[in-house]
Image (tube, rainbow, N blue to C red):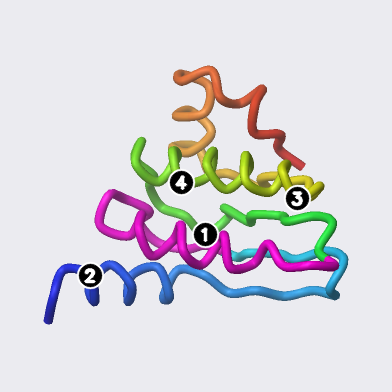
């Protein structure tokens, strides 16, 4: 199994999408780290389709997140803004909330 396949599998296991075309919820779970980051980026960007006005990233089941995954969230937000799509984080656990606070990104990535 290649590293790219492993990363893709990890991101697919940690993401589901729900909701109507105007609002999409990406439910993430498990560990979001450097291994999962490339596939996570691909999947989030894939959710920024025409008709979507809001992407809510549900972090309630994320057990840990590193700076590589956080960079993916920021990149997805930037790309979404370019398409007129709002991105909000929902229900970050303690570790993710602390990472957002320590990095100062809690104000850049709004929590719903």
Under circle 4, the secondary element is helix
N-terminal of the two: label 4 or label 3? 4
Under circle 1, the secondary element is strand
Q: Which mark is residue 72?
A: 4
Residue 107 picture location, percent across and down:
66, 22
Viewer-nearest of discs 1 and 3: 3
Residue that numbered label 3 is attached to:
83
Could you say which is closer to the camera, residue 56 or residue 60?
56
Image position of 51 with respect to 35: above or below: below
Could you say which is closer to the camera, residue 28 or residue 42?
42
- Real-space CA distance between mark 2 and mark 4, rounded to the nearest whole angstrom: 16 Å
Q: How crowded is mark 2: few (under 14 residues within 10 Å), some or many (20 or more)?
A: few
Residue that numbered label 2 is attached to:
4
Image position of 9 with respect to 101: above or below: below
Q: Residue 61 carries which label?
A: 1
N-terminal of the two: label 3 or label 2? 2
Residue 31 picture location, percent across and down:
35, 56
Which span of residues is magenta-colored?
A: 28-51
Q: Are marks 1 and 2 in contact (CB under 8 Å)?
A: no
Given the current orientation, which residue lies at the most extreme left position?
A: 1
N-terminal of the two: label 2 or label 4? 2
Residue 57 picture location, percent across and down:
64, 54
């Amino acid at each position: 199994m290649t590293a790219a396949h492993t990363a893709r599998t990890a991101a697919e296991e940690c993401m589901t999408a729900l909701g109507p075309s105007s609002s999409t919820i990406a439910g993430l779970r498990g560990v979001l780290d450097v291994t999962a980051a490339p596939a996570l980026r691909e999947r989030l960007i894939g959710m920024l389709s025409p008709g979507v006005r809001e992407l809510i990233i549900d972090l309630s089941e994320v057990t840990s997140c590193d700076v590589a995954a956080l960079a993916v969230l920021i990149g997805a937000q930037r790309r979404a803004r370019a398409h007129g799509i709002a991105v909000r984080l929902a229900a970050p656990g303690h570790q993710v909330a602390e990472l957002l606070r320590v990095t100062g990104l809690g104000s850049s990535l709004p929590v719903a």
